[in-house]
Image (tube, coloured by chain):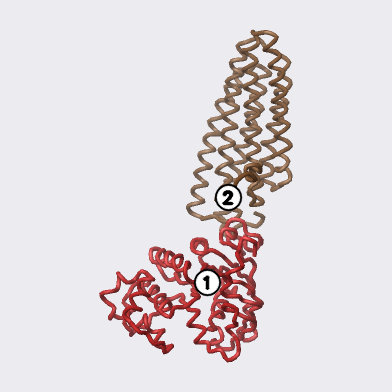
Amino acid sequence: MSESIDKTAIKLDVVKLRAWFGAFEVLRGISLSVLARRVTAVIGPSGCGKSTFVRCLNRLHELSPRAGVTGQVLLDGSDIYAAGLDPARVRRRIGMVFQKPNPFPHMSIHDNVLAGTRMNGIAVPDRDQLVERALRQVGLWDEVKDELDRPGHHLSGGQQQRLCLARALALEPEVILMDEPCSSLDPVATAKVEELIRELGERYTILIVTHNMQQAARVSDLTAFFYLGEVVEYDATDVIFTKPNDARTEDYITGRFG
Amino acid sequence: MSRAHTDREYEAELRKLREQVVLMGSKVEEMIASSMRALTLRDDALADKVIQLDHEVNRLEMETDELCLRILARRQPVASDLRFIAITLKLVTDLERMGDCTVNICERVLELNREPPLTETFVVLPAMADAAQAMVKDALDALVTGNIQRAEELIIDRDRVVDAYYAQIFRELLTYMMENPRNIFRATRLQSIAKYLERIGDHATNLAEMIVFMKKGKDVRHPFSRAISKTP
């Protein structure tokens, strides 16, 4: 990491993180500091471990069969893998949005937004207010305010993805993980979600995994290039896309990878 | 840019761009050499030929710009590819201006050919032209081979040589003019030619600076300006 990164505001400090599926080591010792209120992109070829990486950051990876994890993930200095810590508590603070929009199909838009709070048994004093605030945050309020009782899966793909983001935001997380959030969206819906990422990036710590390098270049402040389960280079996005330091990063982003 | 792109069409576009810049550079070199021969041999036809050759350089500039825009729009180049395209857009501007300088030289040559020769300075001007032409050649060699050291020499040492020639010629021509007012018309033409060659050296320095930037990703222009103030 070059001096262009301010290390004083680390939100999530990943230390020597290793992850397995059975005997196969997917992450081979990742150390990376995710900065508070910044958008960090993780790029790399298929199979480089970038999705596994984000799934380790809110303790989703361990739910996969034969999964293993070692190392530390420090959220504001405290290890989310500490013994006795309830993973559900971690996931409240570190929300996630997935590749395919996954609103609960038989729940109304209104209930979809509140689903996380219900599952976590969180008392919400004013539900309607929370729903409106979360939907406004993702720019969906004006589009759906008259059909809050309709099922969420009637919405377009882009609207569904923003609904899922609203559901994550309703839990008031500190970190939002996004795994290929636009890969099933058309360019207009993608542009809306990207704009949203930039806006939310001013208040939340966002980590986005993407195959789309131009997307990483557009939305992120920092970019990490993963290859074969290791961080090859992590730096300001401007540096990565104009003058990367590692030849492997250069080869990957310019399209010279075998 | 050692390894080839997975996309061969993209690779071919970048190669074409490189070839186009080198072709433009070789035309400019030829124009510098021919303009000096037109001066020393008092050859009007050769001077006219250089003036005509400039159209080709202009055309190459436009074609190269167009290709750069097309690659930017369709490939979204990054890193070393992006730096290459960005400097190419500027390289061709400098090369085109060098071409214009040789046209201006030939216009002065045509004027001088209507007058009796003012002999001695003719030796120093072609030497100065050789130095300027070698700068253009070496800058483009550095572009092709990626030899940064060569480009870095150009930026400081070699441009000084051309500047020194200019100062020497200017002093000499002053003495001619003071000796005899009849020399003034020819001496000012010759002084203009020296000035155009000096400009060519400056443009070649620009080429070298851009090539260093392309290879290193580091802007080596205007070190003194950089030290003085930073925009907030």
For residue A34, what is the image quadrant?
bottom right
User: Which residue is painted at 49% across and 80% down in the image?
Assistant: A93
For residue B177, what is the image quadrant?
top right
Q: Can residue A28 be seen? A: no
Q: Amino acid at mark 2?
A: Leu
Point out residue A238 in the picture as x, y percentages from the top left corner. 56, 58
Classify 10 Å Cα crowding around label 1: few (below 14), some (14-19), many (20 and above): many
User: Which residue is painted at 70% across and 21% down in the image?
Assistant: B169
Q: Can residue A54 be seen? A: yes
Give the CA distance from mark 1 to mark 2: 34 Å
Q: Amino acid at mark 1?
A: Leu
Find disc 1 in the rendering and name its residue.
A207
Element carrying mark 2: helix
Say which colour chain A has: red
Say which colour chain B has: brown
Q: Residue furthest left?
A: A146
Q: Residue furthest bottom?
A: A84
Counting labels gives: 2
Point out residue B193 in the picture as x, y percentages from the top left corner. 63, 23
